Structures are given as C-alpha cells and as structure tokens.
Image (cartoon, helix red, strand yellow):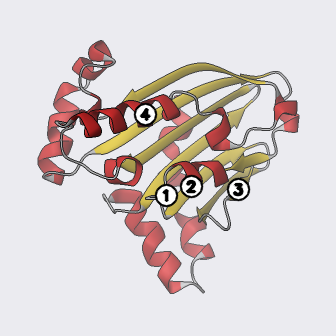
Amino acid sequence: MRHLLLALPFALLPVIAHAAEHHYHDHHDEHASLGSHEHGVAQLDAALEGTVLEIELRSPAINLLGFEHAANSAEDKRKVADTRAQLEQPDRLFGLSAEAGCRLDEARLESPLFAGKDHEHEHEHEHEHEHEQHDAGTHSDVHAHYRYDCSAPDALTGLDLQALFEAFPGTEKIQAQVIGPNGQQGKLLRAKQAQITF
C-alpha cells in the first residue's frame, strides 16, 4: 500500500499539468507545492485499496502552528500540544463519511517541533530530518500518516477537507492527489472548494 502513496506525486504529474493548462496561477502553485516548502500550501496524498485507506499530509509547520521555530515559551508549547492533539484525531479533518465505517488503525506524526514524542520513530529518521533541516534552513515541516480500515469502502466517495481548513486557517491551499477505484487524480483545494472524489 505504501508504494501507492510514494508513487502518487510522480504518477499524477501529467494529470496535474494537463488540468492546469488553462489556469496558469494554479499551475504554478501546484508544481511549487509538490517539491518545495511554501507557506500556506500543504500536500495531501490518499490511496484507497480494498478496505484500506491511507492518507499522508505534509505541511510547513507555520500553516498549522503559526510559527516554525522551536517551542520555547509556554504559549508555543501549548500550541504544539493542541495541534498535535488535533492531528491525532483526524476523522473530522478529512470528512470521512460515517457510512464507510472507517476505523483509524495507525497515526504517525513527524516533525522537528514534536521533539520528545514518537522518539523511536524520529530516531529512525534522524539523518533524514537533519538533511531536511539543512536544506530548508529554519523551515520545519509536519508529516502526518494515517491508515484506516473501512468496513464499507464503497460508501467512501471522497474526502472533504473543509474542517481541516477551518482548524488550520494558515493553510490556504492543499494539493490533493488520490488513487481510488476510479483511477487517479490531482486537484488544488481551497477552503471554498475543499472536496476531492476517489
């Protein structure tokens, strides 16, 4: 299943390029969001295969927290804890239909700003994080991965990220890319157009 998510950005590049031919600004935003740290822009990949739904969200920390520096003050630490708590209960953020019966099997959060949490997993990727921080300077990203088991996947027609935009107003756009029973597609989502179908 993981190979589907890893392949998404590459598999969908022609789809995105074609869809954006008549929308220059969207075209620029979509490609920038695929490979760079751009404030206000996040990347979401989702794959539905059988009863398993996997979702990955990558975002600059500033979109979610309002800052990218290490949390030193009590206020910043509280904001990190609150944001982590929201990301650890993602059902509402992705607008999964109750009829699909999707149960969260796994949730993993990774970010330099979540130091002290998921220590073993972060240690496993220590060199990767150092490389990312070196490339991005002071930039910090948040990477969230979720795996669901859905008892009625046919009822899962898509994702609705309206609640995610509301929870994290620093997120202006999300480049969503999905693979599902009807193939693959990419779409640039905003608060007023926050739905993508499988």
Mark 4 crowd level (few <14, some 14–19, many ≥20, 10 Å Cα) = few
Q: Looking at the picture, which amino acid does disc 1 mark?
A: Pro
The secondary structure type at the circle numbered 1 is: loop
Against 92, residue 120 (above or below) is above
> Which dot, 1 or 3, sits closer to the camera?
1
Residue 161 visible somewhere in the drawing: no
Front residue of 119/13: it is 119
Q: Which residue is mark 4?
A: 82
Q: Is residue 8 left or right of residue 144?
A: right
Front residue of 30/12: it is 30
Residue 154 visible somewhere in the drawing: yes
Q: Are marks 3 and 2 in contact (CB under 8 Å)?
A: no
Q: Are marks 1 and 4 in contact (CB under 8 Å)?
A: no
Q: Looking at the picture, which amino acid does disc 2 mark?
A: Phe
> Which dot, 3 or 2, sits closer to the camera?
2
Q: Are marks 2 and 1 in contact (CB under 8 Å)?
A: yes
Against 166, residue 142 (above or below) is above
Q: Residue at x 19, y 46 (%)?
A: 69
Q: Which residue is mark 3?
A: 196
Q: Position of residue 14 (x, y in %)?
A: 55, 66
Q: Compare marks 4 and 3 and give the one earlier in the sequence.
A: 4
Extreme residue toward the front, this view = 74
Q: Which residue is mark 1?
A: 169
Q: Which residue is mark 2?
A: 165
Q: Are marks 4 and 3 in contact (CB under 8 Å)?
A: no
Q: Residue at x 41, y 29 (%)?
A: 109
Q: Compare marks 1 and 4 and give the one earlier in the sequence.
A: 4
